[in-house]
Image: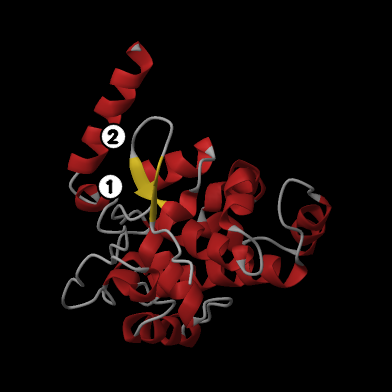
Amino acid sequence: MTTRRTTLTGLDGIVRCAWCGTDPLYAAYHDTEWGRPVRDEVRIFEKLCLEGFQSGLSWLTILRKREAFRVAFRDFDPVAVARFGPRDVARLLRDRGIVRNRAKIDATIANARAVVALHAAGESLTDLVWSHAPARRRPAPRRWSQVPSQTPESRALARALRARGFRFVGPTTAYAAMQALGVVNDHFAACALRDGSGTGRGVARVAARRRQSSKR
């Protein structure tokens, strides 16, 4: 039986989670974003929406289109997106730079309106998401079987989001967002970024290795 690799060593000598492969854009995302705590509400809203667009596709596809998404959706400002109407939907359906899926576009607009409604109720998306962080930090995963696709916390978050009008936020999508936003840390044990998620130590070591590599 072949064991699926959890990490790989890049050409720069850095050991990373294997899911990011060797694509430079994916590796940079892994090193500087994935698993690092995010509390900025706009970026949390963006992540939830893009995770919805990613459904059925690879994250790398979405990552390559992210800048086009940001332009199309007004940098994911919830207030601006909440005002989108039929002309904006028509514009988005013509935009080849993004994923032109009507249901996902409609969901993004609905999600923006849900954020505005949260504010009106005295809540914030940041507090809602982070209130579902696990009470205890799990041990660092060493095998793929130790990385769940959903958890009790992600199921509770999905229910809370849907109850407030959010769409395309099932338990698996919610958990993927929790991983990316640093609500949980699922970098593999051998990954150079594992102990740097949220502290910057792993990121600093990666940056130092890159500087050394560039001097060779």
For the point 51% across and 36% down, the residue is 24
Residue 120 vs residue 209, the one in the foreground: 209
Q: Kindly give the residue lying farthest to the front in the view shown.
A: 1
| Residue that mark 2 sits on | 206
Say whether residue 101 is left or right of residue 65: right
Left/right placement of residue 91 relative to residue 7 reads: right
Measured from the top left, where is residue 34 in percent x and y? Answer: 38, 52
Tag 2–tag 1 contact (CB < 8 Å): yes
148 or 86: nearer the viewer: 148
Q: Label 2 amino acid?
A: Val
Binning the other alpha carbons within 10 Å of mark 2 as few (below 14), some (14 to 19) or many (20 upward) gives many
Pick whichever of labels 2 and 1 is earlier in the sequence.
1
Which residue is label 1 attached to? 193
**Residue 50 % position (x, y):** 56, 60
- Give the answer, above or below, for where 80 lies relative to 112: above
Residue 179 x/y as whole percent: 37, 64
In the foreground, 169 or 58: 58
**Image coordinates for residue 173, horizontal then vertical, percent:** 50, 73
Q: For residue 186, which quarter of the picture?
A: bottom left
